[in-house]
Image: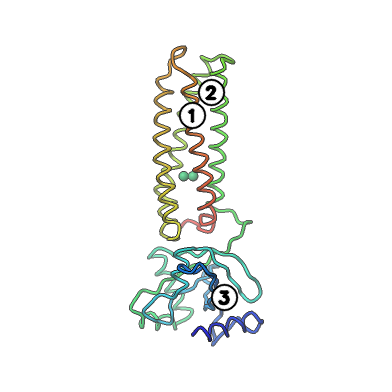
């Protein structure tokens, strides 16, 4: 089997490939779940609604092919089409979407129905999303929200500094800071709730490799919510001339530090996957 694969890969790369026994082929390179080594497989693919779709059929064998295990551990892959090589992200669609895609696969290539009938497992369907920085997606939107929240944090911090330093009309500043702080906290809570209820469960399902990261990011949300609660209590109970603005500023800095680390981690880990995943 490996010898045959090597031969197909070599012919493909020499420009003879692209088709094998009537199949339109690509070369899929994944990172070995156990070995960590890059592994290339020639695969038949089907273009459905502009998406590159592959099936982990293993020709109807009882076990999933190795590449399927690999993408569950690391969804970053390389695709060779014969005319170009590009980086992509492999996603596993949820059940209903999988079934709809598989029906289209079978309509295009009836051989997959035979593999499915032979296999004792449900054949997984995988979408290979090309990474294209020119196309904006949900991940870019997430970064925009973070950047807006970062600006709000900066403005609030500057206001607090003015109060601590006794600059400007502190009574007025304190009042406006209270209102601003409450609206900031509400926006932040809404953002994190949206991630907890929407984006993160969707990502965890499509990209099993992200599960540990998503758990950590969800835990960050709890820590941030706790810091926010303390700040809200301080702000709401703030009495002009009595309360200590330094304490409020320090609590605020703790929130800002934790939040920035959280945003940065989230942007490093989930933006690319979010960008290739359009809702619905
Ligand atoms: Fe988050
Ligand atoms: Fe976020």
In the figure, residue 147 lies in which quadrant? top right
Question: Looking at the image, which residue sits at the far bottom?
Answer: 21
Front position in the image: 269 or 146: 269
Residue under label 3 = 27
How far from the left and from the top, in percent, is residue 209? 45, 60
Front position in the image: 253 or 270: 253
Q: Which mark is residue 160?
A: 2
How far from the left and from the top, in percent, is residue 187? 47, 36
Name the residue: 56% across, 64% down.
88
Q: Are marks 1 and 2 in contact (CB under 8 Å)?
A: yes
Q: Residues within 10 Å of mark 3 (few under 14, many from 20)?
A: many
| Separation of residues labelled 1 and 2 (CA atoms) | 9 Å
**Labels 1 and 2: the sequence-earlier one:** 2
How far from the left and from the top, in percent, is residue 95? 38, 65
**Labels 3 and 1: the sequence-earlier one:** 3
| Separation of residues labelled 3 and 1 (CA atoms) | 51 Å
Left or right? Give the position of 102 relative to 48: left
Give the answer, above or below, for where 249 lies relative to 54: above
């Amino acid at each position: 089997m490996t010898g045959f694969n090597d031969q197909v890969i070599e012919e493909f790369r020499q420009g003879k490939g692209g088709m094998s026994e009537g199949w339109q082929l690509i070369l899929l390179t994944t990172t070995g779940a156990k070995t960590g080594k890059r592994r290339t497989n020639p695969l038949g693919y089907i273009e459905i609604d502009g998406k590159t779709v592959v099936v982990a059929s293993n020709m109807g064998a009882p076990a999933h092919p190795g590449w399927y295990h690999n993408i569950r551990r690391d969804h970053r892959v390389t695709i060779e089409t014969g005319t170009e090589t590009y980086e992509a992200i492999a996603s596993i669609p949820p059940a209903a979407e999988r079934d709809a895609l598989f029906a289209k696969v079978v309509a295009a290539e009836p051989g997959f129905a035979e593999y499915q009938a032979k296999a004792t497992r449900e054949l997984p369907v995988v979408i290979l999303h090309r990474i294209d920085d020119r196309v904006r997606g949900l991940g870019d939107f997430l970064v925009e929200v973070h950047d807006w929240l970062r600006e709000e944090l900066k403005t609030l911090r500057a206001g607090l500094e003015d109060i601590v330093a006794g600059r400007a009309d502190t009574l007025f500043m304190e009042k406006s800071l209270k209102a601003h702080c409450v609206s900031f906290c509400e926006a932040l809570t809404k953002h994190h709730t949206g991630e907890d209820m929407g984006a993160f469960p969707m990502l965890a399902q499509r990209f099993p490799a992200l599960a540990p990261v998503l758990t950590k990011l969800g835990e960050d949300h709890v820590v941030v919510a706790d810091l926010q609660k303390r700040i809200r209590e301080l702000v709401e109970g703030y009495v002009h001339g009595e309360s200590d603005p330094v304490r409020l500023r320090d609590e605020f800095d703790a929130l800002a530090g934790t939040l920035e680390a959280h945003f940065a981690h989230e942007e490093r880990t989930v933006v690319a996957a979010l960008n290739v995943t359009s809702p619905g």
